[in-house]
Amino acid sequence: MRDEFSDVDEFPSISLKIRHDAGMNSFTANKLSSEFDSFNQRHAETFGSAYMGVDLRKSGIKVRGVEQYECRINMVTDKGLFHATSKGLGAVKAVHEALKEIELQVEKKKAKFESRIPSRDDYPSSVLEEN
């Protein structure tokens, strides 16, 4: 089976490259586009720049006539690397679960940076001279 490569879509902060199996209908493609748009809107201010590579493949299993898909997302940002893998009945479900996993990783990383103890360099010199 031949893979199709879609064009790179430039969002304000996240550049997206989707690799998927041939034969995806327009309804599914529109749903996936809306999933990525909503993810971008929620995290546009979080990243200075980001690249998201999405690999979406059919796993060959059908349940009640619906194909099972496997989705792998690798996201490289100025804040770090994020990776998620998921399986779901239908392409939209697989992508949604993987994006949810990426969001959890992003929120965990944001909380880690917000709650860290400031280093000596973070204080103005006048505060350090008083102590």
Image (tube, helix red, strand yellow):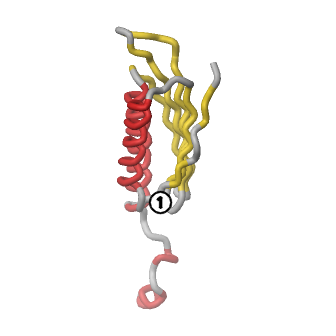
The C terminus lies in quadrant: bottom left
Q: Is residue 92 above or below residue 99?
A: above
Q: Secondary structure at mark 1?
A: loop
In this view, the residue in front, 66 or 74, is: 66
Q: Which residue is at the far right?
A: 2
Residue at the front extreme?
A: 26
Q: Is residue 120 above or below residue 128?
A: above
| Tally of numbered discs | 1
The picture quadrant where one finds residue 115 is bottom left
* Foreground pick, 121 / 128: 121
- Mark 1 is surrounded, within 10 Å at the Cα level, by few (under 14), some (14 to 19) or many (20 or more) other residues, namely some
Residue at 54% x, 59% y is 49
Q: Position of residue 36 (x, y in %)?
A: 42, 44
Hey, which quadrant is residue 88 in on the image?
top left
Residue at left offset 35%, top offset 53%: 42
Q: Residue 58, percent across and down?
A: 51, 20
| Towards the viewer: 26 or 130 | 26
Q: Give me the residue at 48% from left, 26% from top.
A: 24
**Residue 130 at x, y = what percent?**
41, 90
Percent x, y for residue 31?
Answer: 37, 36
Amino acid type, residue under disc 1 in the picture:
Pro
**Residue under label 1:** 12
Placement of the N terminus among the 4 image quadrants: top right
Is 90 or 45 nearer to us in this picture? 90
Q: Is residue 91 visible to the viewer in this orientation of the structure?
A: yes
> As drawn, is 102 to the left or to the right of 76?
left
Examine the rendering and report whether any part of residue 80 can be seen.
no
